[in-house]
Image (cartoon, helix red, strand yellow):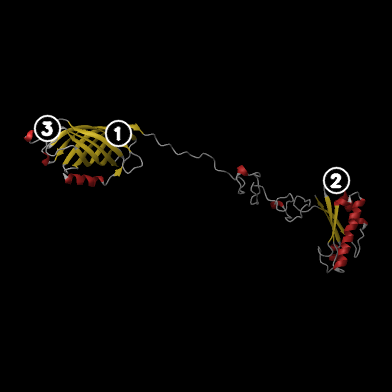
Amino acid sequence: MKKIILSTALCASMMFAANSEYKYEITPMLGGTFTEGNLNLERNYANGGLSFGFNLDDSMFDQVELGFLRSLEDVDYKQKAFNLGTNTSVTRVFGNLVKEYGLNDSTSLYALVGLGIEHFNNEAYGNETGLFGNYGFGIKYKISEDIALKADLRHLIETDHGDNNLLYTVGIAIPFGKKAAPEAPKVDETPAPKDSDNDGVFDMNDQCPNSAVGALVDKVGCEVDTDQDGVVDSKDKCPDTPKGDIVDENGCSLKVNLNILFDFDSSRINNSYDSRIKKFADFMKAFPSVSGKIEAHTDAKGSDEYNQKLSERRAASVVKALEAYGVDASRLKSIGYGETRPVATNETEEGRALNRRVEGSIQR
């Protein structure tokens, strides 16, 4: 008997687990008990019973089995002495943990281990009601989705005297309580955010969706205007415009072409520049919200101190000329830079003539 059990255990160890799609299983069973020779009972008698299986999830075992088996007829005692009666019924109630090992879609092996109570209605020759342990192995064949054939072999060991019984059963397993199918994972149908102009700011947050390729943008996707002159950096040809200057479409300070040149050591404006001065004045009168900045320069002849004062006199001369054309002096700011900002060389007469100049710009 032990050889049979060991060989069955070896086969089961090579299989893999199978899970049930149902919560429960009920199995009517028929079989028999092969008794140990020293129990003074029939060596082989028939049993019938019923078991209930509770299928498990997320456990090392697949099922908890609760059930009972009872001898179908009274079991004879071999000895009739001492008026102990000639027979007894045997009822066994048990609970087992079951592990299933799938072979294919329809066939699996299973192993079980557990405890139970066996009851003798007529106790004799050491056959007494008490606890037993058992283990066993079986095979299960699925006939259809709703029915399966089971057969197993169980070794029972009585706890008081170590008596052995071998139970063999055949049953029809009927599953019920089908488990709900797992919910399909939800697919995030939210479209991936787009960055149509490839400026690093997604369209949903982009307040300037048509930024120039490669342009530096702020957090809302609009091109940066570093010098805050109203012209974005990608189009600004004068990126360091003084704050407040009115600029042209290239981001450069809008300078009215006064281009007034002065004679050497003179602050008098030549009459040939009257039209330019008038044009500057007309522009300022047309836009009363702006102001003008007059910047005057000299060549390098003479001392720094003298040239500084000379540049201031030249700036004042232009301011006075603009006032004559109706521009309020409060809207004009004059600055003399002396010889510090030449636009040409001071080594030639032509270069020095270009440096003796006045420039005008418009500011907000």
**Measured Cα–Cα span from mark 2 to mark 1:** 98 Å
In this rendering, position of residue 89 left or right of residue 18: left
**Looking at the image, is 354 positioned above or below residue 16?**
below
- Which quarter of the rendered picture does the N terminus lie within? top left
Tag shown at residue 218: none
Q: Hey, which residue is sitting farthest front in the picture?
A: 82
Can you give x and y, in whole percent of width and height, for residue 2 in the image? 17, 46
Q: Nearer the viewer, residue 167 or 22?
A: 167
Question: Visible in this render: residue 275?
Answer: no
Binning the other alpha carbons within 10 Å of mark 1 as few (below 14), some (14 to 19) or many (20 upward) gives: many
Q: Which amino acid does label 3 sit on?
A: Asn
**Measured Cα–Cα span from mark 3 to mark 2:** 130 Å
Q: Residue 360: which quarter of the image? A: bottom right
Q: Which of marks 3 and 2 is nearer the N terminus?
A: 3
Q: What residue type is labelled 2?
A: Ala
> Which residue bears the numbered disc 2?
286
**Measured Cα–Cα span from mark 1 to mark 3:** 34 Å
Q: Is mark 3 on a helix, strand or loop?
A: strand
**Looking at the image, is 277 positioned above or below residue 347?**
above
Task: Tell whether label 3 touches label 1 (CB within 8 Å).
Answer: no
Can you give x and y, in whole percent of width and height, for residue 288 in the image? 84, 46
Q: What element carries label 2?
A: helix
Q: What residue type is labelled 1?
A: Glu
Question: Visible in this render: residue 74?
Answer: yes
> Which residue bears the numbered disc 1?
25
Q: Nearer the viewer, residue 187 or 1?
A: 1
Q: Is mark 1 on a helix, strand or loop?
A: strand
> Which residue bears the numbered disc 3?
87
Discs 3/2, front: 3
